[in-house]
Image (cartoon, rainbow, N blue to C red):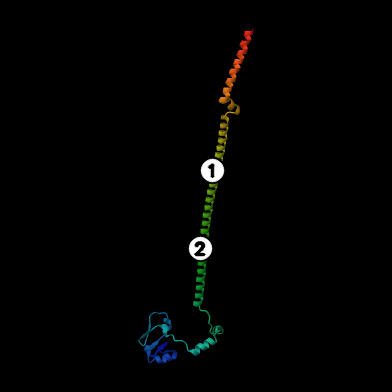
Amino acid sequence: MVLLRADETVLTGESASRRGLSEPHRVAHEFKRRVGDPNPILLGGVPHSPESLMAPAPTETMTQIISVSPLNDAYATAQDRQSAYETLNAATQEQAAQAAAAAAAEAQAKADAAAAAAQAKADAAAAKEAERAQVAADKARVQAEKEAERARVAEEREAARQVAAEAKRQAAQPTVVESVLGSSAVKSMLRSAGTALGREITRNLFGTARRR
């Protein structure tokens, strides 16, 4: 039983019973059974929930109950302990930090992989370019060797041609004897000698015949 006075003072027990005789419209019987009921209780024409009529126990009673409680030693002294909110908040922050660190590590790993791939691509391109340059250098060297060989063969052929031409020229020139015999003076002398010799032979032949 409870009685709600005009000054909002709550009376229970015998006090409420005695006062309720003169103010029955402010009395509620067995209101605890209605705890949780959404329908209000009218006391003095004012609606109240059952929970609002449950006044706290007096301080002396609470102190006496707490002093004899077996949990008094553990909870009598106030502790500045971390609340559940603070614990959850700290755990959430730690999880967020771990997630951020994992994301940063993953991003760094991706960046490192991308850099390694780019470096490998650049190395492959450089190796390919070096290979092209080597092939071009080898081709140029082979071409130069061919050109040098052709020039050498041409020089040898020209030298052989010149030797052959000189030999032919020298072969076409008459010898000293041929030059002497072929001169007009020698020919004239030979003709004179031949004529004189012929006369001498004829004279000898015909002179011998006459004497016989």
Label 2 sits on what residue type?
Ala
Residue 10 image point, x, y percent = 42, 89
**69 to 121, vertically: above or below:** below
- From the viewer's side, name the closer residue of 165 and 189: 189
Instruction: Give the CA separation, mark 2 to mark 1.
Output: 53 Å
- Tell me the mark number nearer the camera, choosing from 2 and 1: 1
Q: Which residue is mark 2?
A: 111
Residue 167 image point, x, y percent = 58, 32
Q: Which residue is mark 1?
A: 147
- From the viewer's side, name the closer residue of 152 and 33: 152
User: Image quarter for residue 45?
Assistant: bottom left
Residue with the most extreme left position? 45
Q: Do tag 2 and tag 1 residues touch (Cβ < 8 Å)?
A: no
**158 to 55, vertically: above or below:** above
User: Image quarter for residue 26?
Assistant: bottom left
Residue with the most extreme top position? 212
Of helix, strand and loop, which one carries label 2?
A: helix
Label 1 sits on what residue type?
Glu
Residue 89 image point, x, y percent = 49, 75
Which quarter of the rendered picture does the N terminus lie within?
bottom left
What residue lies at 55% left-to-right and 37% top-to-bottom? 158
Q: How packed is label 2: few (under 14 Cα within 10 Å), some, or many (20 or more)?
A: few
What residue lies at 52% left-to-right and 65% top-to-bottom? 108
Pointer 2 or 1: first along the chain = 2
Residue 186 image point, x, y percent = 58, 24
User: Image quarter for residue 149?
Assistant: top right
Left or right of residue 112: residue 33: left
What residue lies at 53% left-to-right and 47% top-to-bottom? 140
